[in-house]
Amino acid sequence: MLRGIEPDAFAARLLEQGLAANATESRDPTLELIEQWDAEDATDDPEEIARRQKDAEEFMESLAKSRIEMEGPHARKLWP
């Protein structure tokens, strides 16, 4: 017995205290900001989703074109 408590009960109490302490600790402000931005930008509008996808594809194509212009035709592909 530890402090009048069975070892398994003592271990459980320590785990509960540790979990409770972690739950009350502040989170990383950067992660909180990113989550806030994600929530602000969330949409289920099919037209908006399609527009965002098109923008992303155009951006990736622009990156690939810039890389080829800088490194030549044998530049390593950034993605498939």
Image (cartoon, grey):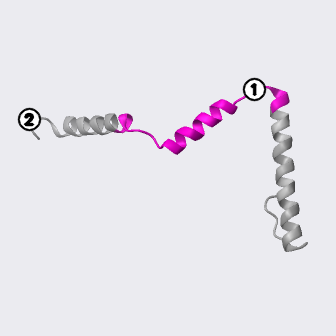
Q: In this view, does 47 lie to the left or right of 13?
A: right
Residue 75 to residue 16: above or below: below
Amino acid at dot 1: Asp
- The spot of residue 56 in percent (x, y) is 81, 46
Other-residue count near label 1 (Cα within 10 Å), few / some / many at <14 / 14–19 / ≥20:
few
Q: Is residue 59 left or right of residue 16?
A: right
* Of 59 and 17, the residue lying toward us: 59
> Residue farthest to the top?
45
**Residue 43 makes an appearance in the image:** yes
Look at the image and tell me in which quarter the C terminus lies. bottom right
The residue positioned 79% from the left and 25% from the top of the image is 45
The part of the image, by quadrant, that contains residue 72 is bottom right
* Secondary element at image label 2: loop
| Label disc, if present, on residue 4 of the rendered structure | 2
> Residue farthest to the left?
4
Q: Mark 1 points at which residue?
A: 44
> Residue farthest to the right?
73
The part of the image, by quadrant, that contains residue 49 is top right
Residue 38 to residue 56: above or below: above
Residue 56 to residue 66: above or below: above
Q: Does the magenta stretch include residue 36?
A: yes
Residue 71 to residue 25: above or below: below
- The spot of residue 75 in percent (x, y) is 84, 71
Q: State which region is magenta.
A: 22-48
* Secondary element at image label 1: loop
**Of the image marks 2 and 1, the number of the one nearer the N terminus:** 2
- Dominant SS of magenta comes to helix
Amino acid at dot 2: Gly
